[in-house]
Each structure stands twice: as C-alpha cells, then as structure tokens.
C-alpha cells in the first residue's frame, strides 16, 4: 500500500543491529540472567552472601517500602494511613532506638491509584531501593497489579490497606500477602448476621458504590443474612464520582425497604442519611465501617445521623481517655505529618505489627523468617489500638487478621453526636 | 525530520548511538557493575517498555488530533478494548499473545471506524466532550458486564504472559529474561507502528488528513472526500489504541476498569501536545515525558537546597505542563527542531521568559511553519468554536 | 406516577448543581473560547478559602469576601498563566488549564488535607414570612425538596438570567462576546481585548465560587469534590450549547432528570443504575448528532 520508504530501511537495519548486538552481548548475559521465578517460589533471593542478612537489611538500616496515592484525585483521603505508619516508624527510630539495632527507613512511592504506575513504583522499590518488604500498600486496583509479582519473587507484602476479600481468600496461592484493613466482605457479613439476629422480618435495601469496595460489602451482607429472616428487596449502585445518590435512596424507599445497608464512603453516606431524614423516612441505616468517625456528625446534622449503625474493629481516635489512643495522639503530634484520625490509627497499627514481627527475628533478618514470624506470633493477639476483645489472628492458612467487629450506633448526647457500642463483639463465621 | 539535515556522518553517529541505547543500554545495562555511570536497572528496562507502549497510543492519537485536527478525549476506551481483548483471549481462551494483540487492535480499530461516523457531525470542544463521554462510560461498561470482563476485580494476565520464546534463543543464542523479552516485544511493536505512522503521514492519506485539518473546504475543493478520510483517521487512531492496549496487557500484566479511566485519556492528550502535535518525534518524546516527569522531583531533590516537598509532586507536574506550553508551544519536538535549526544560542534565549515567549510568537507569525510537524493544533485559532458545521 | 415525580424533582435538584458550574464554563468559553478544565478546581479552592474564613467569620460576611477573592484569583490566573499563551492553539490552552488543575488540586490537598470537611449551607433568611435557604426540607406533594436544593436552583436561574442580560444588552458583555469571536477585529474596533479576557476569567471564577459554595454542603468539602461535578457540567454545557447560559442550566436539568429516570426505569439486569451514566452520555451524544452545537447553541456558519 505504501512504498517502503527510507524509514523502512532504517527499521530493517535496526533489526539487523539488534541481531549483531544480541550476539555480541551473549557472553555478558551468561549466568547473569535472573532465574525466572516459579509461581510457588518460597525461596527468598538472598543476594548478599552473608548468612542471615537479606536484601534491604544493612548493619544500620532496615528498608521498607510502600505504594499509595499521595497526590492525584481520590487518593489524598487515605494519605493519613501512611502518615500513621510513617509516624510510628519515626517514633520507634527516635525513642526506641529503632529495631534490632537498626533504623527503619520507610520509602513510600506515589502511584496515583493507577495500576500501571503501581507496577512501576513497586518495581522501583524492589529493584532500585531494594526494600526488605512492602508494608501497607494502598488501593485495590493498584495493589492487584503488583501482589502476584510480590508473591512470585517472595517479598513480604504485609498489611495491605484495602479491604478487598481476595487478599486473604487463598493464603496458599499468595503466602506472602497479608491484609490488615478489616475485610469488606467480613464487615458486610457481620452486619448481615447482626441484622438477621436482631431485626428479623425486616426488608433490606442495599445501596453500594459500584466497585470492589461496594460489591465485596454486598457479597458479605448476603453471606451473613439469613435468607429465611430477611429479604433483600432492592439493590442500587452508584459510581464513586456520583454527585447525588438521592435518586437511589428514593428507589430503596419505594421498594419497601425497612433497613438500608449502605456500602458508601462518608460523603455519600452523609448525603443518604440527610435525605432520608428530610424525607421523614425512618429506615434503619447500616453504613460501612469507614464511616465510624465522629466527623460524620459534621458531615450531616447529628439528628440525621442519629440511630445509624456502623461497626469498628479499632479504637476510635476521639477516645482520648484510652491510654493507647492518647499515646497515638502524642506520636502523631510529635512525629506525624498529619493530625490523628481513624486512618492514622490503622496506619499506626500496621507499623506496630511490623515492628513486632521484626523484633521477633532480629537474629535472622530474612524475608522468610519475617513471614514465619507473622504466621506464628499473632495468635489471639490483642492489639493496643484494637477494640478490647478483637483479636488479631494470623497463621499460614489464615491470612484474615481481623474477624471480629463490634457494632456502633449514633446517639445524641446534649445535641452532639456520639458513637456508642451496641451488642457484643460479633465474629465472622467462615463458611467452608 | 528531513529538514534537520546535519552532515551525513554525524547523522550516522546519532543513529548508532540511539540504536545502541535502545537495543543494548536500556535492556542490558543492568549487567554492568552497580554504580556504573547511567547504568539502568531492570526497573528502567520495564520503564522502557512502558514508554514504548504509551508511544504507540501517542502516535495514534497524534494522527487523529495532530494531523487530522479531531480532538479525542476518549482514547482510554480504545486502549481498554485492546487490553481487555488481549486479557480475555489469553486468560479465558488460551490464545497466543501475539494474535490477541492484533485482534485487540482490529476490534478497537473497527469500533473507532464506527465512532468516527457520528464524530463527523461534531467539531472542536463538542467532539472533545463527546469523546470524553466515551472515556467515562468505559469503566462502567467493563464493570457491568462482568461475565465477560471479570468485573471490578480485573484480570490478572501475568501467568499467561509468555516468557522469551525459543526462537530468540535459537536465532541469537541468548536467553532473555522476562523483562528483556517484554521490552524487546514492546519496542518491536512500537517501532513497527512508528514506521507505519511515518508511512501513513507521508502518504496520500496523510496529506489528505493534513489538508482536511487546515481547511475542510479547500480539501473538498481539491477532491478529497472529507468524511471518508476523517473516519479513516479515527479508525487508524483507534487501531493504534487497541494495539497499545494489547501491549499494556503484556507489559503491566493486569487490566481492571480502574486502569482505563478518563484521566488516562486526558494524559494521552497531554502527552501529544507536550510532545508536539503533528509530529512523530513528538509522540515519542511525549510518551517519554509521561514516564520520566514523575521522577523529576526525586531527581531535583538530590540537589541540595532544591528540595521540593514530596506532597507537591503533582503541582510540579502541572507547572511543568504550563511552562512547556508557554516556552515551547510546539511541544518538545518543536523545541528540538528549533535546537537543530537555529542552534543552541537562540534556544537559550527562550529561557529568558518574556523575551522567549515573545520571540517564539513573533517567529511563528512571521515564518509559516517549516514542516507539517510544526503547524500546531489543527490550525484551530481562537475563533474555531464559531466555525464548526460540516453540513 | 408518584415515583416518577419524585425522581424528576430529585433530578432537577441534581441538575441545577451541574448547571451552576456549567454556567461558569459557558462564561469562560463565551468570553475566551477556552474549555477550562481547571474550573472545578478553582471553585474547590475558593470553597476551601471560604471554609478558612468561616472559622472566624459569619456566613454572609464570608460570601461576598469569597466572591471578591475568586474574582481576583480568576484575573490573576488570566494575567499570569493564560496571557502568555494567548492566541496559542486551543489545545495548548486546554493543556495549560489541565496543568492548573494539577496545581490547584495539589495545593488544596497540601494546605487543607485530604480528609473531607463538612460545609454549611447558606443560613436561613426570612423575608416577609417566607423562608429562604437554610437546612431542612419542604414537603411538596409526592416528595420533599430541601431548602438547599431550592437555593441552588434559584441561584442557577438567577445567574443564568443575569448572564443572559449581561451578554445580550450591556456594552461590556457585547464587547466580551466580540472579543471571543474575533479578537483581531475587536481590537481594531477599539475593544481592549486583554482587559476583556481578564474580566471574563474573573467573572467565571466568581460564578464558579458560588457553585463551589453551594455544592460543598451536598458532597462535602474535599479536594476531589468537583471532579464528578465538572464532568457533568461539561456535558451540560455541551448539551445546552457552549455559548448559551440558558443552555447550560437547561442542559444540566436534562442530564439530572434523565440520569434518574434511566436509573429507575431501565431494566436492572443489563442497564439500571449501574449504567445510568453511560446511557445518559449516549442520550447527550444523540442530541448532539441532531444539533451539533447543542440545544441552544448558535449554529455557526461555515467561513471560507
């Protein structure tokens, strides 16, 4: 069709050059090619000859990495998670002399929530910065793009900061990945159990964000609900970028829902609560645990939030009477870039668990040893910042650290909103 | 490019240096001892693959926007089509990777042709926003029909991405690592598409594209079928997007609805404008910038006293965009052409802000652009919004 | 039928949100022929400024203050960032606005943080016994509509009328239109083109600031808050016709209402709320195919 021009010739000569160069560099290549990692690789590639010392560990430093969205559009709301982890590591370095006589160096790279960029920055962390482990990687799509690589190469992928159900669903296929954020599926299931136990016979309407966050919640809810006791009468989705979800709330009302299960983030949940209140619709709202924050009462009038039920596994940042929470506030104000909040508590938690696991393996700082430690030391462990009774439990066959949560209900005290416990701690019942 | 015409020997030297860089330095310099100047780790090789992949999209979008004057903010949709076609065929049906890339390209191209038909009626900002709608709808469609697309979880292609095939070993006697193989694959596809693009823009078809962009009426008067060529431009451009998508599936190894959101489309447009509209070189430079610019704050922070707060990296990126548009209105390629044509002395003048801006405007007004690579955005002047209408 | 009206009323409420920002987009397009991708972020930033002022001031003190600040910001942006690329191809200016998008969003995140903040609706005013604005809702037959929704709608319509009059009948408005259409001829006619552009940006930033102040109570104040709104506002402006203030508001209302109707009445199995964005966008494209410059857009002549 087109005449082979000069550039085709150039192209052909490029190809020829490729051939020549490839042959020329044959010698250098030999023995240098990294072995293709087998999918089930459990062997840590210790590149340094010294026994018991691994990539990312020097005599003075332990290098850890993370990927998250610092800037960009939707990322910034979760930046406090990393700020919490960062602050805790700084605190350990400054006040406890680091870990195993070494300082923790924490490198967090910005991935803008973009999977392709996440692959890029995680490869940078692994190959250029030579991190020992990835800690608190954030964003479901972004992390989905990298976690297989981490498992293939045998790099600990600890405390994933998204609640997608897949991280912990198959620990044998992904032995190096352990999430920390309460699993959306588990949270949905626990809410479902609570509804069926306490409100049988009521119709449930579901409103969810159209992504893995929303869908895992809804799957969990269906898992936890007893179909004989409660029926789901309507399911309505909305996009994360939606401006207004009141149309969907109206549809739930018209479908005859008595209970609304909202897998939404604070902005949308507040809008739904406010609208139901204005429309005098007294449905019982259950909202995702990401809303268990006193800020909800600033997002919507406290009277509108009143009665809504959410759940939590961690202590909330406004419970400053609690010594652990008070300590967290101190750490954040002295070492943190951001003020304390529920997300910084989660991040702090990740830092604390990491340091615990590292301390257990001081004499053998390898990646396998780290995973072994993670699998063995967290047995019914009561974290400082977890709710009393919520026990962290990790083993080789169970990568779901948090399987218990407690319901919270919004109460009005002197016109001010407050979250109060209702009921006991509920455990997620795994169906096999 | 023909205009550059440095002496033949230096041209050859430049060519050899570039070839050496692309074919040996990027993929293989990681074997050099650590600390070797400018040594590229395997991670840089991967970045090379990413640049090759984005260059393919940029070439395609440049054919549509730069050469034919149709603005598209919907190219993430075509990349998604290519990426998902490759992923689904490879993972669910076990097809060999190279067939899936071609099929992905063809499907995207076919859809591009179809979209090109209604696009005929729209111009300028109306076309831009309508195609932005395409980019917005794509993730929603991918999430909805999850029987085919695996829904919000995305598709992990990595297990299916082939290792270096045997023939490489047979022919060249070396075994490439996965990274090196994927890099050569992406580079090969990109070069192939680059040669194709060069041929297109220099062919009768390409000249028709430019004629339509500069004046539809004049083009029509010359006997060019305006609708036909505008549709062809859309189809070719979408084909490029699809091929890039197929390459994406191999390089990144994972596709999900969030991988292809509208921000990606906006990035593509930025890529070609910053690189240089209606310029093949510009497409490549733009794609390189897309990968390299996010690293710049990190590089700058090595210079003492020049540390940029990490939190402001996105603002840094925005400022870079604005500065390029002010001081290099024809993009990086335009800057490059100036450098070659007028010599570094005057380009340095560009760096003194006021004078530089003024100089570049004056120069543009006086001298008509030298090559098709210089004509700017479809010669859409400020009144373009008022002169659509092709009926 | 009751359900239908409920959805229409909610749709009008949403649509007036889109229309409000679309007005700002139209204003800039009309006076400078630029699609401003940073419009939403400018509004977001002024709303953050408003939030800071509210920490020590009254709402009605803050309101005019923020409008003045917004106008200043718009003029500043035009003078410093847009002026150097004046006369450049449209795509170059679009990229410059995208660069501003990144800067403004990042600066807001850096200065005020990414955690959402609650933002108050304009407080209640009573004029001769009739209540305007404030919290709460009004019962209107089949459904309720909040006072805040009414506030948004009233502001959108009022700004729309004001802009219509401004562009149609005032010398400044006419001069701005002339500038947008043909800067060279306008300059020959003695219009101070540069000043017109500055005024256009300043006005647009002001309208955008009003939009930000009224939208924030609905979706919380946070850096990405205007993202969704901006996309729909673009769609609204294009649907109504990029040079028509009336079109902006009508376009917004059409999108708001059709979104809700699509979400409610299409078969849930293969469309439904999951696909309401897609179907709505498809409707817009179909309308554009019939009227390529939008519903109220001026049909352009072909010039040789």
Image (cartoon, helix red, strand yellow):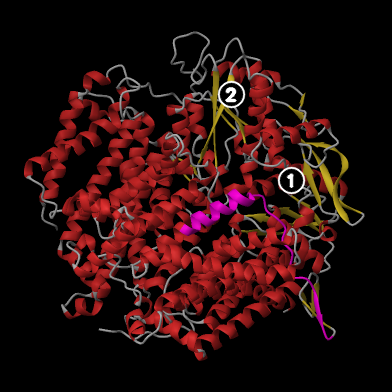
Visible residue check, residue A73: no
**How far separated are the C-alphas under marks 1 and 2?**
31 Å
| For residue B175, side relative to residue A154 (left or right) | left
Characterize the local packing of mark 1: few (<14), some (14-19) or many (20 or more) Cα atoms within 10 angstroms.
many
| For residue A326, side relative to residue B198 (left or right) | right
Which residue lies at the image location 85% right of the left edge and 49% below the top edge?
A: A418
Rendered-image quadrant of the C terminus of chain C: bottom left
A244 lies above or below C247: above
Question: SS class of the residue under badge 1?
Answer: helix
| For residue B7, side relative to residue C88 (left or right) | left
Q: Which is nearer the N-term, disc 1 or disc 2?
A: 2
Front tag of 1 and 2: 2
Instruction: Point out which mark residue A289 bears.
Output: 1
Instruction: Point out which mark residue A325 bears.
Output: none
Q: Residue furthest bottom?
A: C169
Instruction: Point out which mark residue A104 bears.
Output: 2
Q: Which residues are magenta?
A: C100-128
Which residue lies at the image location 27% right of the left edge and 44% below the top edge?
A: B189
Q: Nearer the viewer, residue B316 or A378?
A: B316
Q: Chain of mark 2?
A: A
Q: Quadrant location of residue B372? A: bottom left
Q: Residue furthest right?
A: A414
A238 lies above or below A100: below
- Residue A301 coordinates in the image, percent (x, y): 81, 60
Q: Quadrant location of residue C90? A: bottom left
Question: SS class of the residue under badge 2?
Answer: strand
Rendered-image quadrant of the N terminus of chain C: bottom right
Q: Chain of mark 1?
A: A
Which residue lies at the image location 48% right of the left edge and 43% below the top edge?
A: A115
A381 lies above or below A315: above
| Residue B136 highlighted magenta (yes or no) | no
Q: Nearer the viewer, residue C132 or A338?
A: A338
């Amino acid at each position: 069709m087109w005449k082979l021009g000069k550039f085709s010739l150039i192209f052909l000569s490029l190809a020829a050059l490729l051939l020549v160069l490839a042959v020329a560099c044959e010698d250098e290549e030999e023995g240098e090619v990294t072995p293709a990692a087998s999918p089930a690789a459990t062997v840590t590639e210790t590149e340094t000859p010294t026994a018991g010392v691994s990539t990312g560990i020097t005599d003075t430093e332990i290098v850890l990495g993370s990927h998250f969205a610092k800037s960009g559009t939707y990322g910034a709301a979760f930046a406090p998670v990393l700020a919490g982890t960062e602050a805790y590591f700084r605190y350990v370095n400054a006040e406890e002399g680091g870990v195993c006589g070494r300082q923790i160096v924490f490198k967090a790279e910005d991935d803008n929530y973009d999977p392709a960029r996440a692959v890029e920055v995680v490869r940078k962390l692994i190959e250029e910065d030579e991190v020992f482990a990835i800690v608190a990687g954030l964003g479901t799509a972004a992390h989905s793009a990298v976690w297989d690589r981490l498992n293939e190469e045998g790099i600990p992928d600890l405390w994933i900061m998204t609640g997608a159900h897949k991280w912990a669903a198959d620990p044998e296929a992904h032995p190096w990945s352990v999430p920390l954020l309460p699993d959306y599926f588990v949270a949905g299931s626990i809410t479902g159990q609570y509804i069926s136990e306490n409100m049988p016979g009521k119709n449930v309407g579901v409103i969810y964000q159209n992504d893995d966050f929303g869908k895992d919640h809804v799957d969990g809810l269906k898992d936890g609900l007893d179909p004989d006791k409660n029926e789901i009468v309507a399911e309505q989705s909305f996009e994360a970028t939606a401006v207004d979800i009141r149309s969907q709330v109206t549809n739930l009302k018209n479908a005859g829902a008595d209970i609304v299960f909202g897998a939404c983030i604070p902005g949308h949940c507040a809008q739904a609560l406010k609208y139901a209140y204005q429309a005098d619709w007294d449905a019982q709202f259950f909202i995702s645990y990401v809303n268990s924050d006193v800020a909800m009462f600033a997002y919507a009038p406290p009277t509108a939030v009143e009665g809504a039920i959410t759940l939590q596994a961690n202590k909330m940042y406004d419970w400053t009477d609690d010594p652990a929470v008070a300590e967290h506030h101190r750490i954040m104000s002295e070492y943190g870039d951001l003020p304390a909040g529920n997300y910084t508590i989660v991040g702090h938690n990740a830092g604390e668990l990491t340091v615990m696991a590292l301390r257990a393996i001081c004499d053998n700082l390898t990646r396998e040893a780290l995973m072994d430690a993670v699998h063995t030391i967290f047995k019914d462990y009561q974290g400082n910042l977890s709710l009393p009774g919520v026990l962290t439990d990790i083993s080789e066959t169970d990568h779901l650290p948090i399987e218990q949560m407690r319901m919270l209900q919004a109460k009005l005290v002197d016109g001010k909103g407050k979250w109060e416990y209702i009921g006991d701690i509920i455990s997620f019942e795994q169906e096999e | 490019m023909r205009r550059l015409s440095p002496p033949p020997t230096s041209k050859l030297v430049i060519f050899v240096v570039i070839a050496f860089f692309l074919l040996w330095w990027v993929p293989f310099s990681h074997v050099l001892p650590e600390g070797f100047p400018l040594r590229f780790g395997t991670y840089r090789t991967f970045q090379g693959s990413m640049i090759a992949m984005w260059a393919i999209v940029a070439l395609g979008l440049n054919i549509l926007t730069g050469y034919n004057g149709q603005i598209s903010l919907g190219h993430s949709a075509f990349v998604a089509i290519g990426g998902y076609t490759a992923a689904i065929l490879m993972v669910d049906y076990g097809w060999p990777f190279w067939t899936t890339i071609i099929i992905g390209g063809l499907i995207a191209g076919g859809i591009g042709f179809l979209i090109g038909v209604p696009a005929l009626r729209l111009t300028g900002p109306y076309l831009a926003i309508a195609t932005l709608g395409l980019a917005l709808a794509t993730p929603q469609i991918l999430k909805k029909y999850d029987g085919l697309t695996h829904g919000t979880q995305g598709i992990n292609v990595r297990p299916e991405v082939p290792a270096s095939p045997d023939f490489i070993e047979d022919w060249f006697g070396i075994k490439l690592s996965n990274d090196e193989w994927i890099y050569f694959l992406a580079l090969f596809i990109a070069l192939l598409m680059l040669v194709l693009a060069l041929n297109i823009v220099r062919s009768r078809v390409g000249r028709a594209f430019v004629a339509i962009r500069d004046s539809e009426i004049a083009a029509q008067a010359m006997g060019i079928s305006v609708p036909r060529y505008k549709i062809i431009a859309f189809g070719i451009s979408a084909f490029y997007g699809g091929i890039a998508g197929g390459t994406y599936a191999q390089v990144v190894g994972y596709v999900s609805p969030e991988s292809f959101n509208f921000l990606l489309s906006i990035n593509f447009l930025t890529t070609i404008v910053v690189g240089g509209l209606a310029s093949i070189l510009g497409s490549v430079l733009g794609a390189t910038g897309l990968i390299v610019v996010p690293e710049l704050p990190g590089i700058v922070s090595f210079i003492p006293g020049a540390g940029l707060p990490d939190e402001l990296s996105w603002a840094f990126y925005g400022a870079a965009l604005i500065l390029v548009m002010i001081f290099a209105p024809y993009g990086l390629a335009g800057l490059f052409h100036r450098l070659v044509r007028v010599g570094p002395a005057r380009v340095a003048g560009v760096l003194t802000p006021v004078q530089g801006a003024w100089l570049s405007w004056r120069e543009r007004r006086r001298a008509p652009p030298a090559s098709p690579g210089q004509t700017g955005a479809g010669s859409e002047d400020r009144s373009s919004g008022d002169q659509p209408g092709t009926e | 039928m009751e359900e239908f009206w409920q959805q229409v009323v909610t749709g009008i409420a949403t649509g007036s949100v889109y229309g409000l920002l679309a007005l700002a987009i139209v204003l800039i397009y009309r006076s400078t022929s630029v699609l401003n991708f940073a419009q939403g972020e400018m509004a977001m930033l002024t709303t953050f400024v408003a939030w800071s002022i509210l920490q020590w001031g009254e709402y009605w003190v803050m309101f005019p203050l923020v409008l003045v600040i917004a106008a200043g910001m718009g003029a500043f942006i035009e003078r410093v960032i847009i002026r150097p690329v004046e006369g450049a191809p449209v795509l170059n200016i679009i990229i410059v606005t995208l660069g501003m998008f990144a800067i403004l969003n990042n600066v807001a995140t850096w200065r005020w943080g990414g955690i959402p903040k609650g933002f108050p609706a304009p407080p209640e005013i009573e004029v001769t016994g009739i209540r305007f604005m404030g919290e709460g809702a009004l019962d209107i037959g089949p459904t309720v509509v909040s006072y805040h929704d009414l506030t948004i709608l009233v502001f959108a319509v009022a700004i729309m009328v004001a802009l219509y009059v401004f562009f149609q009948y005032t010398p400044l408005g006419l001069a701005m239109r002339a500038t947008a259409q043909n800067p060279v001829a306008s300059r020959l006619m003695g219009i101070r083109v540069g000043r017109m552009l500055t005024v256009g940006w300043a006005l647009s930033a002001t309208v955008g600031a009003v939009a930000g102040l009224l939208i924030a109570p609905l979706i919380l104040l946070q850096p990405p808050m205007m993202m969704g709104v901006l996309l729909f506002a673009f769609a609204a402006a294009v649907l109504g016709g990029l040079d028509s203030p009336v079109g902006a508001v009508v376009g917004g209302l059409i999108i708001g209402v059709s979104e809700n109707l699509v979400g409610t009445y299409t078969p849930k199995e293969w469309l439904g709320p999951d696909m309401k964005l897609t179907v709505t966008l498809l409707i817009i494209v179909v309308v554009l195919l019939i009227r390529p410059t939008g519903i109220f857009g001026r049909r352009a002549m072909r010039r040789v």
